[in-house]
Amino acid sequence: MEAAKLNIKQWAEDDRPREKLMRKGAAMLSNAELLAILIGSGSSDESAVELMKRLLADCGNSLRNLGRMSLGELTGKVERTSRVTGMKKTVRRYKGLGEAKAVTLMAACELGRRRMGEDAVELPSIQSSVDLYRYFRPQMQDLFHEECYVVLMNQACRIMDRVLISKGGLTETSVDIRLILREALLSRAPVIALCHNHPSGQLRPSVEDDRITERLLKACRMMNIRLLDHIIVADGGFYSYCEEGKLV
């Protein structure tokens, strides 16, 4: 007699998809395991993981092909011959995969397509201090208080994100080097730039600006992160530490 199939809840905890994801991260799961988390359960004949393995096999193990399947193809019926009676009967092609679960899979595939579309959009590129100034000028030129941002870039100096590090008063803002490095490390940004404004209109850096830049440059070198520039935006212009030769 064939042994009874184990429900996922009866599996060893390390083998359960949800628990495995929480313990080891999503990257450690197979495509079938990730899809099994989405549908939640399989049928009396096979677990959610086994069901998704079968579905993927029918798609040539291609998520792209899975994303092309219609609701009818996912929930449709096929004619099969009973092993017991030899009679033909019409059954659901993927038992345990009803409309609700199929719609969940289709939604996940659509989100994947949309993310690829976002990734394909060309990111702004910073090739000079002028580019950095133009990027921040619309936001900073009319501020009556100081703000400091770190710009997170990839190896090609394309902007991945920018993060507000501090927001201060009329004459100064407190900048914590640790917060800057934290953002860079979390985003895995190999290149960063710092930008803050002087509401007073003074273009020249203060003693504190010089001190922060020097400390940040040393910290970046230790972490193998490139500090592309630190610019100060003021009314009608900007100051660049890179152009002044202070980042060598």
Image: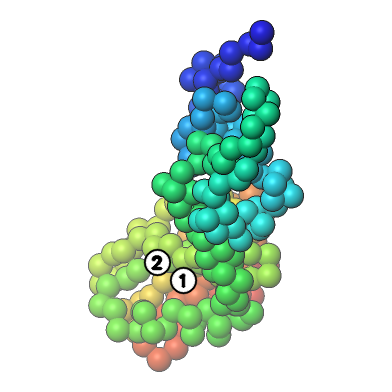
**Foreground of the two, 213 or 92:** 92
x, y (%) of residue 96? Answer: 50, 36
Residues packed near mark 1 inside 10 Å, few (<14), some (14 to 19) or many (20 plus): many
Q: Tell me the residue at 68%/65% (across/down).
A: 155
Numbered badge on residue 195: 1
Q: Is residue 118 visible?
A: yes
Residue type at numbered disc 2: Cys
Q: Disc 1, disc 2: CB below 8 Å?
A: yes
> For mark 2, what is the residue?
148
Residue type at numbered disc 1: Cys
Q: CA distance from mark 1 to mark 2?
A: 6 Å
- Establish if 183 lies above or below 226: above
For label 2, the SS is strand
Q: Tell me the residue at 40%/66% (across/down).
A: 148
x, y (%) of residue 173? Answer: 33, 63
Q: Quadrant of the N terminus?
A: top right
Labels in figure, total? 2
For label 1, the SS is strand
Numbered badge on residue 111: none
Q: Quadrant of residue 144?
A: bottom left
